[in-house]
Amino acid sequence: MEKKLDSGQVFDDTRECEPGALDPAASAQQGLYRTTKRIFDITFSLAMLMPLLLLCGIVFGLNMFWNPGPLFFRQLRKGKDGKGFMIIKFRSMAPTDKRTRYADDPLETSRVTPLGHILRASEMDELPQIFNILMGEMSLVGPRPEIFEFAETYESFIPNYAMREAVRPGVTGYAQVMQGYTDTIEMVRRKTELDLHYVRNMSWRFDLRILIKTVALVFHLPKIR
Protein backbone atom coordinates (compact mmCIF):
# COMPACT_ATOMS: atom_id res chain seq x y z
CA MET A 1 0.00 0.00 0.00
CA GLU A 2 1.38 3.38 -0.97
CA LYS A 3 1.51 6.35 1.40
CA LYS A 4 2.58 9.93 0.79
CA LEU A 5 4.79 11.90 3.14
CA ASP A 6 4.41 15.63 3.79
CA SER A 7 7.33 16.21 1.47
CA GLY A 8 5.31 14.67 -1.39
CA GLN A 9 7.44 11.51 -1.53
CA VAL A 10 5.54 8.24 -1.83
CA PHE A 11 6.63 4.96 -0.33
CA ASP A 12 5.18 1.48 -0.32
CA ASP A 13 4.89 0.07 3.20
CA THR A 14 4.36 -3.52 2.03
CA ARG A 15 7.76 -4.05 0.41
CA GLU A 16 10.81 -5.38 2.19
CA CYS A 17 12.63 -2.89 4.35
CA GLU A 18 16.18 -4.05 3.60
CA PRO A 19 17.56 -1.75 0.85
CA GLY A 20 18.91 -3.54 -2.18
CA ALA A 21 17.55 -6.93 -1.09
CA LEU A 22 16.64 -7.95 -4.67
CA ASP A 23 19.31 -5.97 -6.57
CA PRO A 24 22.94 -7.16 -6.20
CA ALA A 25 24.36 -3.81 -7.34
CA ALA A 26 22.15 -1.89 -4.91
CA SER A 27 23.02 -4.38 -2.17
CA ALA A 28 26.75 -3.84 -2.73
CA GLN A 29 26.22 -0.08 -2.68
CA GLN A 30 24.31 -0.35 0.60
CA GLY A 31 27.09 -2.52 2.03
CA LEU A 32 29.66 0.17 1.19
CA TYR A 33 27.39 2.87 2.63
CA ARG A 34 26.91 1.02 5.91
CA THR A 35 30.64 0.33 6.27
CA THR A 36 31.64 3.93 5.62
CA LYS A 37 28.84 5.14 7.88
CA ARG A 38 30.18 3.03 10.75
CA ILE A 39 33.69 4.36 10.16
CA PHE A 40 32.33 7.90 10.24
CA ASP A 41 30.36 7.19 13.44
CA ILE A 42 33.49 5.94 15.21
CA THR A 43 35.71 8.78 13.92
CA PHE A 44 33.17 11.46 14.88
CA SER A 45 32.58 9.94 18.32
CA LEU A 46 36.30 9.71 19.11
CA ALA A 47 36.73 13.35 18.07
CA MET A 48 33.88 14.34 20.39
CA LEU A 49 35.05 12.25 23.33
CA MET A 50 37.25 14.86 25.04
CA PRO A 51 34.69 17.69 24.69
CA LEU A 52 32.05 15.30 26.06
CA LEU A 53 34.19 14.43 29.10
CA LEU A 54 34.69 18.15 29.75
CA LEU A 55 30.93 18.70 29.47
CA CYS A 56 30.35 15.80 31.90
CA GLY A 57 32.46 17.65 34.47
CA ILE A 58 30.51 20.88 33.97
CA VAL A 59 27.11 19.19 34.19
CA PHE A 60 28.22 17.23 37.26
CA GLY A 61 29.08 20.50 39.02
CA LEU A 62 25.81 22.18 38.01
CA ASN A 63 23.80 19.15 39.12
CA MET A 64 24.65 19.89 42.75
CA PHE A 65 22.62 23.11 42.53
CA TRP A 66 19.89 22.63 39.90
CA ASN A 67 19.62 18.89 39.25
CA PRO A 68 20.41 16.83 42.38
CA GLY A 69 21.05 13.16 41.72
CA PRO A 70 23.07 10.94 39.36
CA LEU A 71 24.85 12.47 36.36
CA PHE A 72 23.55 9.93 33.85
CA PHE A 73 20.18 8.40 33.08
CA ARG A 74 20.30 4.86 31.71
CA GLN A 75 17.29 3.09 30.26
CA LEU A 76 16.63 -0.13 28.36
CA ARG A 77 15.89 0.61 24.71
CA LYS A 78 15.24 -1.63 21.72
CA GLY A 79 18.00 -1.51 19.12
CA LYS A 80 19.12 -3.20 15.92
CA ASP A 81 17.61 -6.66 15.33
CA GLY A 82 15.37 -6.14 18.35
CA LYS A 83 18.25 -6.41 20.83
CA GLY A 84 18.03 -4.45 24.06
CA PHE A 85 20.72 -2.01 25.16
CA MET A 86 21.10 0.65 27.84
CA ILE A 87 20.91 4.13 26.37
CA ILE A 88 22.96 6.80 28.16
CA LYS A 89 21.75 10.39 28.58
CA PHE A 90 22.40 13.27 30.91
CA ARG A 91 19.64 12.97 33.51
CA SER A 92 17.12 15.80 33.12
CA MET A 93 14.35 14.63 35.45
CA ALA A 94 14.06 14.09 39.21
CA PRO A 95 15.00 10.47 40.02
CA THR A 96 12.23 8.01 40.87
CA ASP A 97 12.19 4.30 41.73
CA LYS A 98 8.64 3.86 40.51
CA ARG A 99 7.38 3.39 36.99
CA THR A 100 5.15 6.37 36.34
CA ARG A 101 4.71 6.40 32.56
CA TYR A 102 3.25 3.95 30.03
CA ALA A 103 3.28 3.73 26.23
CA ASP A 104 0.32 6.05 25.68
CA ASP A 105 1.14 8.57 28.43
CA PRO A 106 2.52 12.11 27.82
CA LEU A 107 5.90 13.29 29.07
CA GLU A 108 6.06 13.87 32.83
CA THR A 109 7.02 17.54 32.58
CA SER A 110 6.55 18.04 36.33
CA ARG A 111 9.66 15.92 36.96
CA VAL A 112 11.95 17.93 34.67
CA THR A 113 14.48 19.85 36.79
CA PRO A 114 15.65 23.46 36.21
CA LEU A 115 18.92 22.28 34.65
CA GLY A 116 17.00 19.52 32.89
CA HIS A 117 14.96 22.11 30.97
CA ILE A 118 18.18 23.61 29.63
CA LEU A 119 19.66 20.23 28.74
CA ARG A 120 16.49 19.21 26.89
CA ALA A 121 16.00 22.52 25.09
CA SER A 122 19.60 22.44 23.81
CA GLU A 123 19.52 18.66 23.12
CA MET A 124 22.68 18.36 25.24
CA ASP A 125 21.04 15.57 27.25
CA GLU A 126 21.50 13.32 24.20
CA LEU A 127 25.29 13.83 23.86
CA PRO A 128 26.36 10.92 26.14
CA GLN A 129 24.97 8.61 23.46
CA ILE A 130 28.40 9.03 21.89
CA PHE A 131 29.33 6.20 24.27
CA ASN A 132 26.52 4.09 22.75
CA ILE A 133 27.88 4.81 19.27
CA LEU A 134 31.38 3.69 20.26
CA MET A 135 29.95 0.47 21.72
CA GLY A 136 28.25 -0.26 18.38
CA GLU A 137 24.73 0.08 19.79
CA MET A 138 23.79 3.28 17.97
CA SER A 139 24.65 5.44 14.95
CA LEU A 140 24.70 9.20 14.60
CA VAL A 141 21.70 9.02 12.25
CA GLY A 142 18.90 6.47 12.37
CA PRO A 143 15.46 5.82 13.88
CA ARG A 144 15.36 6.89 17.52
CA PRO A 145 15.49 3.84 19.85
CA GLU A 146 12.23 3.28 21.71
CA ILE A 147 11.84 2.24 25.33
CA PHE A 148 11.90 -1.56 25.17
CA GLU A 149 8.47 -2.13 26.71
CA PHE A 150 6.92 0.63 24.62
CA ALA A 151 8.37 -0.91 21.43
CA GLU A 152 6.86 -4.28 22.34
CA THR A 153 3.48 -2.58 22.74
CA TYR A 154 3.70 -0.66 19.46
CA GLU A 155 4.74 -3.77 17.53
CA SER A 156 1.51 -5.45 18.58
CA PHE A 157 -0.73 -3.02 16.69
CA ILE A 158 1.34 -0.79 14.36
CA PRO A 159 2.04 -2.62 11.06
CA ASN A 160 5.73 -3.04 10.19
CA TYR A 161 6.87 -1.22 13.34
CA ALA A 162 9.63 -3.79 13.94
CA MET A 163 11.16 -2.98 10.53
CA ARG A 164 12.69 0.10 12.18
CA GLU A 165 15.06 -2.34 13.86
CA ALA A 166 16.72 -3.32 10.57
CA VAL A 167 19.37 -0.64 11.23
CA ARG A 168 21.19 0.84 14.22
CA PRO A 169 19.09 3.45 16.03
CA GLY A 170 20.33 7.02 15.85
CA VAL A 171 21.07 10.00 18.06
CA THR A 172 19.06 11.97 15.51
CA GLY A 173 16.78 10.78 12.74
CA TYR A 174 14.33 11.65 9.99
CA ALA A 175 11.29 11.39 12.25
CA GLN A 176 13.00 13.57 14.86
CA VAL A 177 13.66 16.46 12.49
CA MET A 178 10.33 16.18 10.66
CA GLN A 179 8.03 15.61 13.61
CA GLY A 180 9.86 16.01 16.92
CA TYR A 181 8.83 14.49 20.24
CA THR A 182 5.96 11.98 20.15
CA ASP A 183 3.52 11.61 23.02
CA THR A 184 0.38 10.17 21.39
CA ILE A 185 -0.30 6.91 19.55
CA GLU A 186 -1.17 8.75 16.33
CA MET A 187 2.16 10.56 16.48
CA VAL A 188 3.92 7.21 16.96
CA ARG A 189 2.17 5.90 13.82
CA ARG A 190 3.38 8.94 11.90
CA LYS A 191 6.88 8.54 13.37
CA THR A 192 6.91 4.91 12.19
CA GLU A 193 6.06 5.95 8.62
CA LEU A 194 8.91 8.44 8.62
CA ASP A 195 11.37 5.94 10.13
CA LEU A 196 10.47 3.27 7.56
CA HIS A 197 10.91 5.81 4.78
CA TYR A 198 14.43 6.45 6.08
CA VAL A 199 15.31 2.75 6.39
CA ARG A 200 14.24 2.11 2.79
CA ASN A 201 16.04 5.11 1.36
CA MET A 202 19.02 5.68 3.63
CA SER A 203 22.13 7.08 1.98
CA TRP A 204 24.90 9.58 2.67
CA ARG A 205 22.85 12.29 0.97
CA PHE A 206 19.83 11.52 3.17
CA ASP A 207 22.01 11.42 6.32
CA LEU A 208 23.60 14.77 5.47
CA ARG A 209 20.18 16.30 4.99
CA ILE A 210 19.10 15.02 8.41
CA LEU A 211 22.27 16.31 10.09
CA ILE A 212 21.81 19.77 8.55
CA LYS A 213 18.19 19.85 9.73
CA THR A 214 19.30 18.75 13.20
CA VAL A 215 21.82 21.59 13.46
CA ALA A 216 19.17 24.04 12.23
CA LEU A 217 16.72 22.86 14.89
CA VAL A 218 19.24 22.91 17.74
CA PHE A 219 20.45 26.42 16.92
CA HIS A 220 17.00 27.71 15.86
CA LEU A 221 18.12 28.50 12.32
CA PRO A 222 15.70 29.06 9.41
CA LYS A 223 13.91 25.90 8.32
CA ILE A 224 15.72 23.83 5.70
CA ARG A 225 13.60 21.71 3.38
Image (cartoon, rainbow, N blue to C red):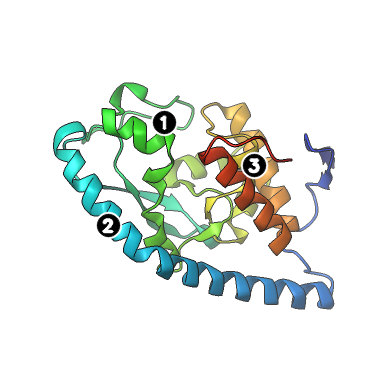
> Which marked residue is nearer to the observer: mark 2 or mark 3?
2
Q: Quadrant of the N terminus?
A: top right
200 left or right of 64 in image: right
Tell me the quarter of the picture where residue 68 sits: top left
Give SS at disc 1: loop
- What numbered label is drawn on residue 102? 1
Q: Mark 3, residues whose alpha carbon is within 10 Å: few (<14), some, or many (≥20)?
A: many
| Quadrant of image for the C terminus | top right
Is the C-beta separation of discs 1 and 3 under 8 Å?
no
Q: Can you give x and y, in whole percent of width and height, for residue 120 in the image?
A: 40, 36
Task: Residue at 55%, 35% (x, y): give it.
Answer: 220
The residue type indicated by label 1 comes to Tyr
In the rendered image, which residue does mark 2 sit on? 54
Please give left or right for residue 198 compared with residue 110 in the image: right
Q: Which residue is mark 3?
A: 192
2 and 3 marks in contact (CB < 8 Å): no
Q: Please identify, in this view, whether the residue under mark 2 or under mark 1 is nearer the observer.
A: 2
- What is the distance, in whole Å, between disc 2 and disc 3 at their CAs? 35 Å
The residue furthest top is 110
Residue 165, given in percent of the width and then of the height, sits at: 58, 56
Amino acid type of the residue that numbered disc 3 sits on in the rendered structure? Thr
Q: Which residue ends up furthest to the left in the rendered image? A: 64
Type of the residue with mark 2: Leu
**In the rendered image, which quarter is residue 109 located in?**
top left
Marker count (numbered): 3
